[in-house]
């Protein structure tokens, strides 16, 4: 992603215009969600996909916590600081559909969640100069070398997750691409900033604006191997002088399937047929629909660069990342097919609807179905069902939810994207299975053979075989082990032996984004500040504490990402205390801070109650069945099939009755 052409981010002029909006004027109402949202067992839809371990004492997210227990939560005046950097769009308060760029979702703060603005922060940034220079250790020395931390703490060990299917990893990644894209800084003339030599070795002098990653002398790889990459574009690059800087976000923050539809009008329009609401597609050799082929293959697909043989290279609402690996393409194709299916059905039900109406209604329903899967099936898997329940993250089983909060900022939080959520890189296996209907593995692909080389998806019946692989193969366990396919061979060029190191980049990205050290997140999330390494024992085991104490000079130096991964998981969750806290906070904001959230009533974009009740039938299993030729599936697609989650015929999966969309 880094080093890729950043040309898709529009170059809106962004100047501070003092006095245009008083950022101190509004005080958010206090934690009102607790009062109104049903939170008893009976009120929530029951799911089956969750680790059954009960959490007897689930904690609260910072927004709902007693303020005295959540130390360091930024006040609104600081949180809104970046708003002044970006032009405020004009809004139509009666609009029924989301804008493509996310602007005007919040009518009072129309830039919140909009693409091409800045991330928000939940804790104050920690830069050594207060503006943008990466953190140093408490003593003033440089922090420990990130690649050394990686090779010491985060090795490769094949440990499949006991229950979760590979779909859990894949769904996690599409949410990342829906809500976050950090663009690389460029060189002075706007061209790509080269931080390494083309042959993958280090340059003599590290160019300014590259991550300061030095290759350790005792690195297990070759000595001159280069692990660095450009730093991330920030508000200063947009001519806005707020301190500390905020990093630019190049997609809409909302859970609005922007990776399918695009985050700007040009991309969105380029993906539409403008006929019957449908999205553009190409028909594959087997007569099925696939994402359209891009003419710019050389920019986004390794296959096209290296083979130059007209290999298919897909495009989507997230053109620079969709081809990252075959399963990402498979998941996006599934939603493309769903959109076009919904257009066909709506056309039959409401023949008078024109192209625009069909496109918008299909998009709105698809996003509703996708959001339902996220909150009903995925979030409980991430943070645990008990935690999800006490923090009002589970869907209601009936009626509308009327708790939209216009003062809750839904913009993606830096600590979520530059640390907590990235820890799911641990979920990635080194090989992806292709599986037949009898659930036998027919072949496996090595991940690093297929980065940005995705044409395999439309050959033979590979699309269905990859999908069955997502349903049948296990994710890797969420732990301190990462496959070498990402930590040694990331974006390996075919026929080369080395690649980049994603885990080192994650650690370094946290410093790039100014994430404060782990201890600050302990306090934010209601734990005691650790005064010494030994105090970490409430969350981290002794062996790992010893390893941290060897690496870092002081307990206040530890990178949040590093310690967060080492925390023992909370009951029912795959995450430890502070990652659960930040991830929970983020999904809370994406729910209560999204005016178009599918469960809300009384908004111009709200569904009718009968429609909402249909959406509540959605499962991931249903979408897979609707968009493939797979015959059988387990009801809970985020868990591998088992005696408790057996394969059933796709015909027996409950469907939505789209007659609820018939216009009366
Ligand atoms: C094979 C699967 C995956 C690959 C190859 C991959 C690769 C990458 C790369 C190269 C970056 C940018 C690194 C940087 O320079 O900062 C990134 C960022 C990120 N990844 Fe992943 N990732 C994968 C799966 C996932 C999953 C499963 C999740 C979460 C569930 C995730 C969450 C994120 C987030 C939040 C970011 C930061 C956002 C961004 O700028 O794109 N990724 N990933
Ligand atoms: Ca989005």
Image: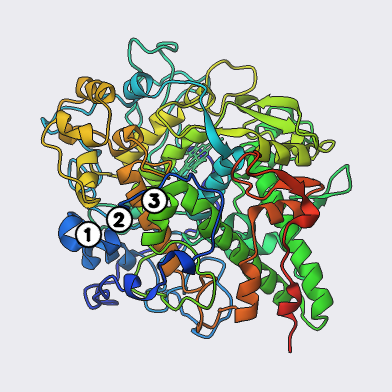
Measured in 3D between alpha carbons, the distance from the residue under mark 2 to the one under mark 1, in whole angstroms, is 8 Å
Up/down of 65 relative to 92, above or below: above
Please tell me which of labels 3 and 2 falls first in the chain.
2
Identify the residue under disc 2: 121
In depth, the one of 613 and 518 nearer the eye is 613
Q: Whole-percent x and y of residue 643?
A: 65, 39
Left or right of residue 530: residue 274: right
Q: Which disc, if any, is residue 583?
A: 3
Left or right of residue 22: residue 565: right
Mark 2–mark 1 contact, CB under 8 Å?
yes
Q: Whole-percent x and y of residue 517?
A: 23, 40
Left or right of residue 325: residue 13: left
Q: Nearer the viewer, mark 3 or mark 2?
A: 3
Measured in 3D between alpha carbons, the distance from the residue under mark 3 to the one under mark 1, in whole angstroms, is 17 Å
Quadrant housing residue 540:
top left
Q: Which disc, if any, is residue 74?
A: 1
Q: Residue at x 62, y 73 (%)?
A: 613
Label 3 CB-ligand 1 distance < 8 A: no
Up/down of 4 relative to 275, above or below: above
Q: Residue at x 71, y 75 (%)?
A: 356
In depth, the one of 355 and 584 nearer the eye is 584
How packed mark 3 is, by other alpha carbons closer than 10 Å (few <14, some 14-19, many 20 or more), is many
- List the single residue furthest toward the bottom: 664
Q: Is residue 247 visible?
A: no
Quadrant housing residue 432:
top right
Q: Residue at x 73, y 57 (%)?
A: 653
Please tell me which of labels 2 and 1 falls first in the chain.
1
How packed mark 2 is, by other alpha carbons closer than 10 Å (few <14, some 14-19, many 20 or more), is many
Please tell me which of labels 3 and 1 falls first in the chain.
1
């Amino acid at each position: 992603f880094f080093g890729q052409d950043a040309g898709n981010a529009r170059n809106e002029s962004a100047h501070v215009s003092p006095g245009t909006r008083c950022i101190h004027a509004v005080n958010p109402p206090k934690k009102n969600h607790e009062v109104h949202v049903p939170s008893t067992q009976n009120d929530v839809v029951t799911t089956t996909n969750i680790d059954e371990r009960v959490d007897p004492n689930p904690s609260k997210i910072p927004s709902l916590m007693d303020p005295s227990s959540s130390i360091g939560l930024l006040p609104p005046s600081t949180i809104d600081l970046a708003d002044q950097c970006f032009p405020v769009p004009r809004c139509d308060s009666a609009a029924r559909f989301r804008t493509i760029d996310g602007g005007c979702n919040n009518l009072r703060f129309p830039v919140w969640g909009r693409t091409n603005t800045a991330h928000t922060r939940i804790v104050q940034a920690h830069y050594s100069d207060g503006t943008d220079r990466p953190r140093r250790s408490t003593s003033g020395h440089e922090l420990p070398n990130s690649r050394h931390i990686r090779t010491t703490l985060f090795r490769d060990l094949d440990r499949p997750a006991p229950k979760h299917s590979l779909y859990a990893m894949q769904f996690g990644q599409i949410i990342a691409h829906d809500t976050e894209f950090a663009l690389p800084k460029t060189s002075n003339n706007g061209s790509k900033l080269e931080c390494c030599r083309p042959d993958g070795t280090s340059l003599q002098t590290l160019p300014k604006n590259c991550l300061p990653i030095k290759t350790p002398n005792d690195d297990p790889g070759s000595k001159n191997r280069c692990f660095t990459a450009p730093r991330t574009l920030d508000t200063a690059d947009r001519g806005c002088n707020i301190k500390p800087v905020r990093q630019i976000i190049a997609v809409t923050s909302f859970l609005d399937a922007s990776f399918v539809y695009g985050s700007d009008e040009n991309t969105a329009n380029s993906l539409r047929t403008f006929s019957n609401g449908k999205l553009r597609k190409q028909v594959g050799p087997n007569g099925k629909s696939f994402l359209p082929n891009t003419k710019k293959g050389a920019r986004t697909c390794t296959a096209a660069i290296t083979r130059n043989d007209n290999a298919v290279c897909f495009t989507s609402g997230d053109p620079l990342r969709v081809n990252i690996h075959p399963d990402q393409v498979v998941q996006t194709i599934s939603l493309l097919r769903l959109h076009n299916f919904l257009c066909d059905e709506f056309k039959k039900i409401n023949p008078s609807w024109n192209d625009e109406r069909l496109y918008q209604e299909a998009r709105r329903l698809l996003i509703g179905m996708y959001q339902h899967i996220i909150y009903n099936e995925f979030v409980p898997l991430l943070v645990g069902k008990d935690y999800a329940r006490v923090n009002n993250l589970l869907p209601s089983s009936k009626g509308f939810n009327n708790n939209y909060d216009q003062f809750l900022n839904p913009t993606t939080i830096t600590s979520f994207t530059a640390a907590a959520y990235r820890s799911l890189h641990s979920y990635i296996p080194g090989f992806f299975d292709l599986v037949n209907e009898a659930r036998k593995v027919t072949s496996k692909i090595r991940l690093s053979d297929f980065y940005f080389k995705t044409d395999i998806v439309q050959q033979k019946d590979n699309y269905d075989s990859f999908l069955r692989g997502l349903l049948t193969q296990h994710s890797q366990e969420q732990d301190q082990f990462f496959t070498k396919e990402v930590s040694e061979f990331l974006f390996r060029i075919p026929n080369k032996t080395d690649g980049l190191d994603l885990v080192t980049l994650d650690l370094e990205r946290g410093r790039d984004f100014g994430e404060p050290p782990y201890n600050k997140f302990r306090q934010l999330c209601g734990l005691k500040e650790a005064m010494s390494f030994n105090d970490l024992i409430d969350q981290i085991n002794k062996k790992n504490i010893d390893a941290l104490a060897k690496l870092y000079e002081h307990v206040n130096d530890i990178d949040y990402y590093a310690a967060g991964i080492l925390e023992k998981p909370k009951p029912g969750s795959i995450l430890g205390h502070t990652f659960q806290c930040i991830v929970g906070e983020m999904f809370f904001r994406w729910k209560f801070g999204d005016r178009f959230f599918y469960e809300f009533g009384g908004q111009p974009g709200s569904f009718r109650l009968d429609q909402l009740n249909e959406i509540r039938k959605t499962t991931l299993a249903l979408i897979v069945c609707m968009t493939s030729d797979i015959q059988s599936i387990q009801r809970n697609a985020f868990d591998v099939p088992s005696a408790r989650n057996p394969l059933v015929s796709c015909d027996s999966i409950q469907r939505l009755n789209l007659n609820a969309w018939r216009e009366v």
